[in-house]
């Protein structure tokens, strides 16, 4: 089995367990595999180890905030080309504040909106997820 035969892996980094639960359920139902992290450092560690197909990163995180985590992902050769969706409760974030994300979603964000954004970004690089039996 090749990587092309496996559903894309999404790394979801969010410190709120309820948010992770909702988004993981929606992404899994859409056919994606999902890894979770609850702070920016854990997100970086998992990204460098797992090399996901896409990262969903909350910007306000404990230990290491999402802003710095995204900067570090963009500086590392292993992760610099991975699409990143920034997910934040800060409605005032704009392009001038962008540390390297490909899309920005403001909370509250519906699971369908997140799933559609993930699908759109991955379609540009990987194609749609494999059909689940």
Image (spheres, rainbow, N blue to C red):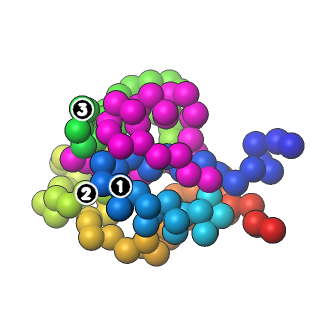
Q: Which of the two discs, 2 and 3, sits closer to the camera?
A: 3
Quadrant of the rendering where the C terminus is positioned: bottom right
Mark 1 or 2, nearer chain start: 1
Q: Residues within 10 Å of mark 1 (few under 14, many from 20)?
A: few
Q: Secondary structure at mark 1?
A: helix
Question: At which x and y percent is residue 52?
Answer: 56, 41
Quadrant of the rendering where the N terminus is positioned: top right
Q: Which of the two discs, 1 and 2, sits closer to the camera?
A: 1
| Residue positioned 46% across, 75% down in the render | 112
Q: Measure the C-alpha gap from mark 1 to mark 2.
A: 15 Å
Q: Which residue is mark 2?
A: 88
Q: Measure the C-alpha gap from mark 1 to mark 3.
A: 16 Å
Question: At which x and y percent is residue 132?
Answer: 76, 66
Q: Against 4, is 67 above or below?
A: above
Q: Which mark is residue 17?
A: 1
Q: Magenta segment range?
A: 33-60
Q: Which mark is residue 47?
A: none
5 sits left or right of 64 in the view: right
């Amino acid at each position: 089995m090749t990587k092309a035969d496996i559903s894309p892996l999404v790394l979801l980094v969010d410190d709120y367990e309820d948010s992770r639960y909702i988004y993981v359920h929606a992404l899994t139902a859409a056919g994606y595999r999902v890894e979770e992290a609850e702070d920016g450092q854990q997100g970086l560690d998992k990204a460098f180890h797992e090399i996901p197909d896409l990262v969903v990163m909350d910007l306000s995180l404990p230990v290491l905030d999402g802003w710095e985590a995204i900067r570090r992902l963009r500086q590392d050769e292993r992760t610099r080309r991975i699409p990143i969706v920034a997910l934040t409760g800060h409605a005032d974030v704009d392009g001038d504040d962008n540390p390297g994300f490909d899309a920005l979603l403001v909370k509250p964000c519906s699971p369908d909106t997140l799933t559609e954004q993930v699908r759109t970004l991955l379609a540009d690089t990987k194609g749609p997820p494999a059909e689940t039996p």
